[in-house]
Amino acid sequence: MWEILNVALIWSTIRLSTPLILAALGGLFSERSGVINIALEGMMLAGAFTAAAITYATGSPYVGLLAGMMAGMLIAAIHALACIRYQADQVVTGTAINILMLGMPAFLSGAFFLSSGSTPQIPKEHLIPWLPIFIAIVMVPLSWYVLYKTPFGLRLRSVGENPEAADAAGVPVARMRYAGVLLSGILAGLGGAYLSIGQSSLFTRNMTSGRGFIALAALIFGKWRPFQTLLACLLFGFTEAVSIQMQGVVKLPSGDDIPVQFIQMVPYVLTIVVLAGFIGSSRPPRALGIPYQKER
Amino acid sequence: MKLLRELLFPLIAVVAAFVVCGILILIIGDNPIETYRLLFGSALSWPVGIGYTLFYATPLIFTGLAVMVAFRCGLLNIGAEGQLYVAAFATAWVGITLANRSPWLLIPLCCIAGVVAGGMWGAIPGVLKARFGSHEVINTIMLNFLAVALLSYFTQYHYKEPGPIMQTLAIGPNAHIARLGRFIPGMPQFIPLNVAFILALISCGLVYVFLWRTKWGYELRSTGTNPSAAEYGGISVRKQIIIAMTISGALAGMVGINEVLGYRYRYYDGFSDNYGFTGIAVALLGRNHPVGVIISALLFAVLQRGGIPVDAFTTHVTKDIVQVLQGTIILFVAAEAFFRGPFAQWGLLKRSKV
């Protein structure tokens, strides 16, 4: 069992956690402002595809990374508009965006690259394996600082907890929520971009494979707080790293492989357990999911 | 007037989605009219097109009903995907282990196994919500992942058909249900449309009777429209949540009958083409009414079937246009205030927080 615990595992944990950390911090800003964001998955896909396509076209991963963030923000703008302006159900809108973004990148790559859902391979020298990890590490304390130590963070949290009171105190509720959702799009887009031009070297169909949902689970596991969310992301990244490293290496006493599926289940079960309040209660922002309508 | 309004906004949303996607098709250099003609033309051709369209509609009617029942109780069941996987596996498991029993015993047992397994998988988030107040959206998402991992384990380690494909052994021939080609003149038997489609239509009727003609249905809907009033009126909200999620899971579980007993005759890992998620769209577009569910399931089935020739016969458009259309339709249905004007508010979904 212990032979897989080595430096490679730690490194692999960090790499696998990075997209989760970025997306979960994105979710943090959105949900702290009172808007449920189950569209993180779709925003990551948008970021992953756009980053790969633009990097391929321009040869610059920095432009690609930026484009990925912009794409995430664009999708977030749709979510924000539907949820804040048109008071749509936030979970339903998020689901719509996830379905839309399952098709859109494949649709566009079919048109532009004449492929069945993936972008062409990007040369190795145009990949960007370090910067997103660095950003993810820096973003955790930064998010904490912004949320808890700046007027912006105070306002953002206030519209998520009690929009009526915030409104009465002169905080522009809608504008703060737009800011929260757009920030989540930028960060989730960055997380997605890391998947395609950092970890891998092209975009493939549905390459996030549920990481947006895992990031959301990590956010709830982390009780909507930056540092706890980081720990949850590391835990989820760790279980993924272990399940990859274990394959064929670790045996049961009987000599059989340990089914990798059991390791994969750990984060899901943990999330359900935490949500049920067995490991301390996890209280969401009070106004989460409720559209705010100004009194007329 | 009320009926007209009920029909109007979904219709506007669908038309708007087709227009938006038409512009998208135009931008990438294809002819939208030609694309849509291909899409509808092939999906509505007799007998192959219509046969397949009805076959694709079957799971969507089940998942649409599943999401609808939960919706009516004020819950969002994103877990139909996991529920239908668990159920399909249970159906296949009975079909494999009791392969030699007579069809009169085996087929009902297979169906019951699926319905019970789906219902139990659906009941889990219901119980978690009723007992601990944890939100069903996250729990159903987690249970979807859990179901996929669990079934991939059972398929791989215990019931796998030797070979590279992740699928179980075949069920006994006695568990096969009839394809409708046997009864409909002119419909070839290779079309997998089967008795499960009839079962789906019957389920719509039963769900209607249950929700609008029985005391239990009334209690369930009261919980959805106003939980505190329902509680005050002597209805146990917790009990209703568990009942609604169980029924929802059981309905989603009936997808397994179509898939396992009527089509592949085994459990195929990852068979669901997003049926659970599309079910949300079906319920929403169908205004959470059984008749609406049938109509919108047919529309989404047309898209699914029509995507195949679009993929083959246009220069740039791939079948991915189907998901783009689906996503756009739900987005427009959800944000219908966009069409309705600033005063309208959508009061159907009153739910707790994630």
Image (tube, coloured by chain):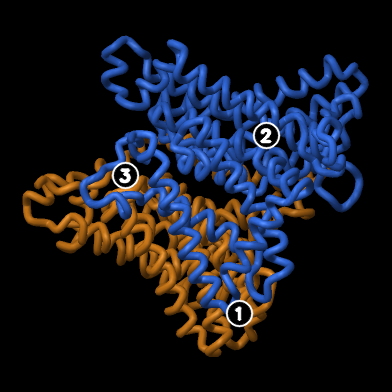
Chain colours: A orange, B blue
Frontmost residue, B240 versus A214 = B240
Mark 1, Cα crowd under 10 Å, few <14 / some 14-19 / many 20+, is: few
Amino acid at the residue labelled 3: Gly
Q: Which label lies toward us, 3 or 1?
A: 1
Question: Could you tell whether B328 is left or right of B182 in the image?
Answer: left
Q: Residue at 43% across / 64% down in the picture?
A: A188
Q: Do dots 3 and 1 share one subunit?
A: yes
Q: Is residue B313 visible?
A: yes
For disc 3, the marked residue is A289
Viewer-closest of B170 and A65 = B170
Quote the CA–CA distance across marks 2 and 3: 31 Å
- The chain that hosts pointer 3 is A
Which residue occupies the extreme left position in the image?
A: A169
Counting residues from the N terminus, which is met first, the one under dot 3 or under dot 1? 1
Q: For mark 1, what is the residue?
A: A112
Q: Nearer the viewer, residue B67 or B21?
A: B21
How far from the left and from the top, in percent, is residue B331? Answer: 43, 53
In which chain is the residue bearing label 1?
A
Instruction: Tell me the number on the disc at residue B31.
Output: none
**Regarding mark 1 in the picture, which secondary structure is present there?**
helix
Callout 1 amino acid: Phe
Above or below, B107 against B137 in this view is: above
Whether callout 2 and callout 3 share a subunit is answered no
Marks 2/1 same chain = no
Depth order, front residue of B55/A71: B55
Residue at numbered disc 2: B255
B29 left or right, relative to A66: right
Q: Which amino acid does the dot numbered 2 rest on?
A: Val
Where does the image place residue B200, in percent across and percent down from the top left? 65, 29
Residue drawn at 64 percent across, 86 percent down: A123
Compute the Cα span from label 2 to label 1: 37 Å
